[in-house]
Image (spheres, rainbow, N blue to C red):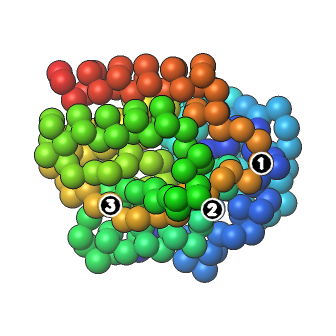
Amino acid sequence: MRASLIIPALNEADCLGQLLAEVPNDQLHQVIVVDNGSTDDTAGVARGAGATVIEEPRRGYGSACAAGAAVAEGDVLIFMDGDGSFVPDELVGLLKPITQDEADLVLGARRFQESENDIMPPHQRFGNHLFAWLLRRRYGLVLTDLGPFRAIKRELLLALDMQEHTYGWPLEMIIKTARAQKRIFEVPVTYRPRLAGQSKVGGTLRGSVLSAYRYFRVLFRYAFQ
């Protein structure tokens, strides 16, 4: 199977160079960076590193992911944040359950060292566990994390008819995959401090509140219809 890596990015010029240098290109058909209206040189850094750059001026994590998926050519699409908090080499582990026909959607479950508990703020961890528990109650899914580092069959993603334009996009993907009774698999992945700057979600109170609101909105729109 051919695999396309899609990296949504907003003002990640300070992170992308190092991150793209770590990407195992021999395992991929293409690497796509979606510039989501950056005001820095995100696009220039990505092009300089050899990635295909797509411009998506409509702000929103879901908008950026959808724009990347629309031009991706791979049979499997991998989504990874552009801040360097995930280890690109570990995408091989995400691909394996799909290439062995054991899963349709594979989620990277973030693992922490005791000395790195402050990478994800407590309120963000609580919210993550809460939504995982709600999905378990609703669909019987045994998940420990709803992280954005994931791989999905391209044909499945197209069939899901994704609508969310915000940070609720990853949750919508899980819910619709569960509703379609497709196989969801979880593999452990490393979670490390972002390479530069501050998280747009857990790094600020506003980002955390908006993210929680969008998750609840997606949950009640699709899971409890």
Which comes before the other along the chain, label 3 or label 2? 2
Real-space CA distance between mark 3 and mark 2, rounded to the nearest whole angstrom: 23 Å
- Looking at the image, how many numbered discs can be counted on the residues? 3
Counting from the top left corner in percent of width and height, residue 113 is at 53, 62
State the image quarter where residue 46 is shown: bottom right
What type is the residue that disc 1 sits on?
A: Ala
What type is the residue that disc 2 sits on?
A: Val
Instruction: Name the residue carrying label 3.
Output: 186
What type is the residue that disc 3 sits on?
A: Glu
Q: Secondary structure at mark 1?
A: loop
Counting from the top left corner in percent of width and height, residue 72 is at 53, 55
Image quadrant in which the N terminus is located: bottom left
Q: At x 49% / y 37%, what residue is drawn? A: 122
Counting from the top left corner in percent of width and height, residue 223 is at 22, 29
Q: Secondary structure at mark 3?
A: strand
Front-lying residue, 206 or 116: 116
CB of mark 1 within 8 Å of CB of mark 3? no
Residue 196: assigned label: 1
Disc 2 crowd, CA 10 A, few/some/many (<14, 14-19, 20+): many
Which comes before the other along the chain, label 1 or label 2? 2
Instruction: Name the residue carrying label 2.
Output: 31
Residue 178: assigned label: none
Image quadrant in which the C terminus is located: top left
Q: At x 59% / y 65%, what residue is drawn? A: 87
Q: Is residue 21 above or below residue 112?
A: below
